[in-house]
Image: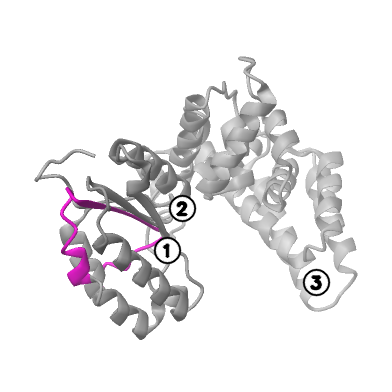
Amino acid sequence: MASNPKAIPIHLLYGSDEDAVKKAAAALLETLKPEDAMNFETIDGRADNVEGVTQSIQKLREAILTLPFFGGGKLVWWKSVNFLDDHGPGRHESVKEALETLLPDLAQVDGTSVTLVITALGLHKGKAFSKALLKRAQAKAFDQPTMRDNSEESIIFEIERRMKAAGLNPGQDAAERFFLATRLDTSLWASEIEKLVVFMGGDKRELTREDVDNLIGKTREVIVWDFCHAVLSGEAKASLELLGALLAQEESEVGILMLLAGQVRLAALGAALRENSLMRIARRGPAAVAEVTSGGEAYLPRKKTGEPISTYMLGQAAQRSQLRTATFWFAALRRLYVTQRHMLTGRGDKRGLLELAVLEIVAEKQVATL
């Protein structure tokens, strides 16, 4: 290890993206590793209770205060700490106090005789220990993407980027399909992309959506997505097969109806905007989205935060429903509301009512003028 007096004493890598934290830690530890492997010590930072936290802190204290017997710089890794936030054991006042007693010991870490690397699953920045640690350490956060901070298309683009970095050649809709199956779990992204790489076997052929389906499998979210879009596209056979698959998984008929109503509502909105030249469907990289004019934005529903709804979801629904008019989709929405009322008042078998509503929508042949 370099004996630089200005060396960074403490490195802190943290965040909800556990896979990214692991990769960053591996790269950092490789650059910091001492010549003598005996001068590298790992302390487990995972604890299930207050007693486990106390033991982990004590082991860390001993590690950073005990210098190597034969001299040289020492590297200590406090690994996967799970009590620096307000979850699990981290919510206890005794844990907060135990962490604060560690601060004088961390002040002894100089980056020359001892260097400390901390990887944590989360960090509550308002706590006294965290504030002091952030002042002393070189910190880097790795958080999983969230729908609040990112659009669907940006997340799909990131998945496609990671696929390409792994040597895959994603075709149209492959990254989107992957997103539907894995959502925002970046740890799952890493394992499933690795699985796809092995499956493709170094073959440079295009990775298709069918490849993703076959390897990752169709999750409940994917089946719901396919069912709604089969209905919007007027595919009767696929609609009933997928509906049967959802009901076989004991999904609620009312729940399925509400999900479908949400997509039909988007189809009606998209058709109305399209017919009034307020929207068009465009492709941005791996995702198809709705491009809404400034005049059309006034008609977009708002989230609780006051922001307009996702144009990605609107574009997906509008793209699949574009062969039918806004009048048709508003009538279909009314039909679903009547079906829901019958379900909730016990007027008929729920499954039969749902199947009938789906058949009435997909069997209708009204076609829009394009």
Q: Residue furthest front?
A: 70
Residue at the (74%, 59%) spot, across then down: 335
In the picture, residue 218 is in which quadrant? top right
- Judge whether residue 104 is colored magenta: yes
Residue at the disc numbered 2: 309
Q: What x and y, as percent, mark residue 99?
A: 29, 74
Quadrant in the picture for the C terminus: top right
Quadrant in the picture for the N terminus: top left
Of tags 1 and 2, the one toward the viewer is 1
Q: Residue 45 got which mark? A: 1
* Left or right, residue 365 beside residue 46: right
- Judge whether residue 109 is colored magenta: yes
Residue at the disc numbered 3: 343
52 to 306, vertically: above or below? below
Element on which disc 2 rests? loop
**Distance in Å between CA atoms under marks 1 and 2:** 41 Å
Residue at the (35%, 72%) spot, across then down: 58
**Distance in Å between CA atoms under marks 3 and 1:** 52 Å
Q: Residue furthest bottom?
A: 93
